[in-house]
Image: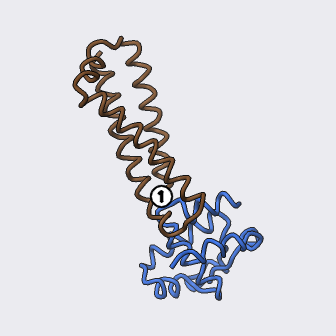
Amino acid sequence: MSVWIDVARLATVVNVLLLASLGYVWGRNYLAVRSKHTLGLLLFSTFLLAENALTLYYYVVDPDLSFWYSTQMPTVVWRVTMLLHVLQAVGLGFLAWVTWD
Amino acid sequence: MEARLWYVLTGTRGGVNRIRLLRLLDERPRNANQLADELDLHYETVQHHLGVLVDNDVLRSSGDDYGAVYLPTPQAEAHWDLIEEIIEQVD
């Protein structure tokens, strides 16, 4: 079971880093060009970053929930959860690649 | 084309430099060397930005030689109002 937890945590860390990079680029662009388009990208990365940071907090830091996640959650649920985090990381990785250009 | 212009010019890390480059080309056609001098960027950086703009049908090159100048494509000219709107916001 622990391998799914580790992969899910790692993918969440990757998501946080990718979204911070995207937010950096889109934040700078919003400062240069004020438009609904630049604001939209910045808000998208901000909220998705908050979601991933909160998830990581519950998986790793929060004393009650991190214990619950690592001991009580069934393996089959961890597998699905891990897959969702990994798919998000692949999608964000591709987005970061085209955005860093 | 409009969505592409927004992303290439304001959604990417190099977007702001690509806007500056378009502003200079709006005044008159220039080659990569002249653009690099005026924007104080490396020649390779300018080449990269020009390549992105050519790939996205914003610019076309007058030829393959070293001194080739860059011009807006007909598609970019059709949306030049939008490009100007974006250009005007950047210092």
Q: Quadrant of the N terminus of chain B?
A: bottom right
Residue at x 30%, y 33% (from the top left corner): A57
Residue A78 x/y as whole percent: 37, 18
Chain B, hue in figure: blue
Pick the front one: B14 or B49: B14
Pick the front one: B71 or B83: B83
Horizontal side of residue A92 vs A40, given as left or right: left
Q: Residues within 10 Å of mark 1 (few under 14, many from 20)?
A: many
Marker count (numbered): 1
Residue B65 x/y as whole percent: 59, 81
Residue B2 x/y as whole percent: 69, 61
Q: Which chain is brown?
A: A
Residue at x 40%, y 57% (from the top left corner): A24
The residue tagged 1 is: A26
Horizontal side of residue B20 vs B84, given as left or right: left
Rendering quarter of residue B23: bottom right
